[in-house]
Amino acid sequence: MPSFSFLPPEIAFMVFQAACSDDGSTARSLASVSRSFYVSALPLIYRVVAIHDLDRVKMLVEHFERDPIHATYVQHVFLAERSPRLDCAAFETTLRALWGFVSSTVRSLVLHVRYRDISVHKAFRTVFDASFPCLTDLVLCGDHPLPGMNLSMPALKRFHTAGLPRRNAAGCFAPLSASCPELSHIRISMSSENNITYAISAAFNLPDAPTDIERMCLDPISIAVPDGEVTTYTPFPTLPAGLVSLVVKPAPPPMTLFARATSMFYNQYLKQLDALVGVCPKGKFSLLPAFKRSMWDIEGYDVDLAKRDWVDCMRGGSGAWSTEGAKSS
């Protein structure tokens, strides 16, 4: 181990970089070994940021205020807030400050917020308001608003929305398609039985697809008009020209009394989604099971699963956009 002190810093950094393929734990451990290790591992300490509460996010922002050069190392960010009581105004302010430091270098971003209150929308909105020129992977978990038509994410390739309780996730199609020319992979992990089949049919221009926006159960999005006011409208659902894969994971039933006990309404919901597999363009649509294997255990997209997928993507895997175990068109 002492022999590492004689390695040129460039070589030591390459060795450390090969070893640091997790959520940042390895980099922090290496940095604590010695002063020379800290110097070599410093860019890796901040390359991957995984934080699980608001107070630690505030501490990170304060650190970047003191040492802004460290913010330039950040490439992958995972932020989770699991508190049942959240100061949404403080969270919004802190996120805006954080994006001001790191948005120009971030390549992957996961924002997972369990708090279920409409006031959390403003915290999620900070992601859509900021400019992320290098961002390729974006995962939003929780009650986030729909994106507008003026996103600044030109490099975005993969998008995942999970846990929207009130809005139809298909409302993300048009804004993303208009603003993200590189977008190729979309995943929707549903938490409600909102009907997305009509919107998907229309977006793929399938035979007999509805053309009436109201039938698609879509939500309006906000747009700015020349006089400075904000208005809303509901765009027709469109998918990216370079779409490779649209993956949908159905919502579990509201309540199961025993295995395979579901309502007629829920069964119809699953049948509508399943029918899309046979009619969508070949290989473009995949339907994940609503339950773990055949055990009928409800599997939500929790923080641990989101983090596992995030790390898998950093290692070159498919992460949340994997179609393993899915029915594909």
Image (spheres, helix red, strand yellow):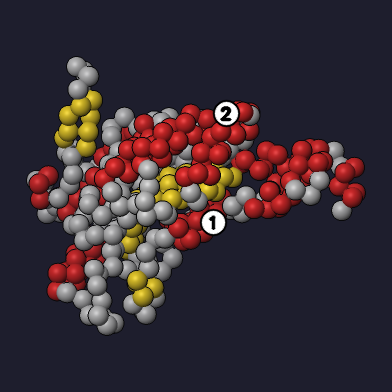
Name the residue at 64% across, 53% down: 25
Q: What SS does tag 1 mark?
A: helix
Q: x%, y% of residue 273?
A: 23, 63
Q: 108 or 92: nearer the eye? A: 92
Name the residue at 17% across, 29% down: 231
Q: 264 or 25: nearer the eye? A: 25
Q: x%, y% of residue 65?
A: 57, 28
Circles 2 and 1 in contact, beta carbons < 8 Å? no
Quadrant location of the C terminus? bottom left
Name the residue at 39% across, 75% down: 293
The residue that disc 2 covers is 65
Relative to residue 159, is residue 193 depicted above or below?
Answer: below
Name the residue at 38% across, 47% down: 86
Q: What SS does tag 2 mark?
A: helix
Q: x%, y% of residue 70?
A: 63, 33
Disc marking residue 312? 1
Given the image, on which type of amino acid does mark 2 rest? Glu
Q: Residues within 10 Å of mark 2 (few under 14, many from 20)?
A: some
Q: x%, y% of residue 88?
A: 36, 41
